[in-house]
Image (spheres, rainbow, N blue to C red):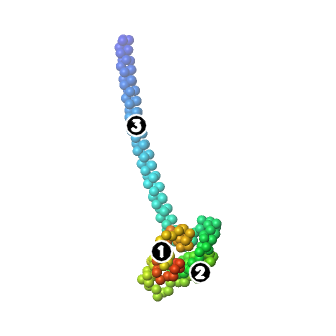
Amino acid sequence: MSVEQWKTIFDWATVVLVGLTFVAGAGALCTGNILSERQSAQLMKFEIDLETQKEKTATAEAVVLRLQKARLPRMLHFDSNESLQALTASLKRNPLPTEIVYKKDDSEAYAFAEQIWALLSSARWQVPRPEPVPDDISADVLEQMGAQPLGVTIVVKAIPANETPDDPLAIVTGLLSKSLGSVARSPDPRLQDNAIKIIILQKP
């Protein structure tokens, strides 16, 4: 073959190689974009799954914590020994006649009643030792006394309309609410003025 023919062949080969290079580059670019999109989708799915798992874990931990708390006995809680001393000093300034009753044969209710009695006694309140609710008192009678079916109820002659944080009733209510999460209050006009009755029934 002549030199001209060889040159023609090499020119066409060059064109083919350039075309193949272009096709290869375009193919690499397209496949790279596809792989990048797939990786982004996989990463997004992983992040969504991770957030979902975190939510499930947090929910499970909350359930476990609630179950653990439900099994623990009720106790009075204080932020520090100093806060306990300050609370006792506040109670000493205005002691009130108080009666504490608890559900009979309920050792947990009795233990909590004793804690309250010990605190109020140390503040020199007029409070006898806790007594069990008599067997002959029905649920209807307890309701008439102002007690809720479960938990702790503070009963007074009348719920004060303009209660201040320094009122002894407010102090006792705040302490029990902080320790238990919530506490009920109910009026009973049969009680004497300024008297408090604390009824401790089965733990909710």
Rendered position, 160 above or below 139: above
Residue found 57% across the figure and 71% down from its top? 76
Q: Which residue is mark 1?
A: 159
Residue found 38% across the figure and 32% down from its top? 27
Q: Position of residue 202 (x, y in %)?
A: 49, 77
Rendered position, 76 above or below 38: below
Mark 3 and mark 2: Cα distance apart in space: 82 Å
Q: Which residue is mark 3?
A: 33
Q: Are marks 3 and 2 in contact (CB under 8 Å)?
A: no
For badge 3, the amino acid type reads Asn
Q: Residues within 10 Å of mark 2 (few under 14, many from 20)?
A: some
The answer to which of marks 1 and 2 sits earlier in the sequence is 2
SS at badge 3: helix
Q: Which residue is mark 2?
A: 126
For badge 1, the amino acid type reads Ile
Q: Nearer the viewer, residue 57 or 5?
A: 57
Q: Position of residue 162 (x, y in %)?
A: 49, 70
Mark 1 and mark 2: Cα distance apart in space: 20 Å
The answer to which of marks 3 and 1 sits earlier in the sequence is 3
SS at badge 1: loop
Q: Residues within 10 Å of mark 1 (few under 14, many from 20)?
A: few
Q: Quadrant of residue 116?
A: bottom right
Q: Position of residue 33 (x, y in %)?
A: 40, 37
Q: Give the foreground label among 1 and 2.
A: 1
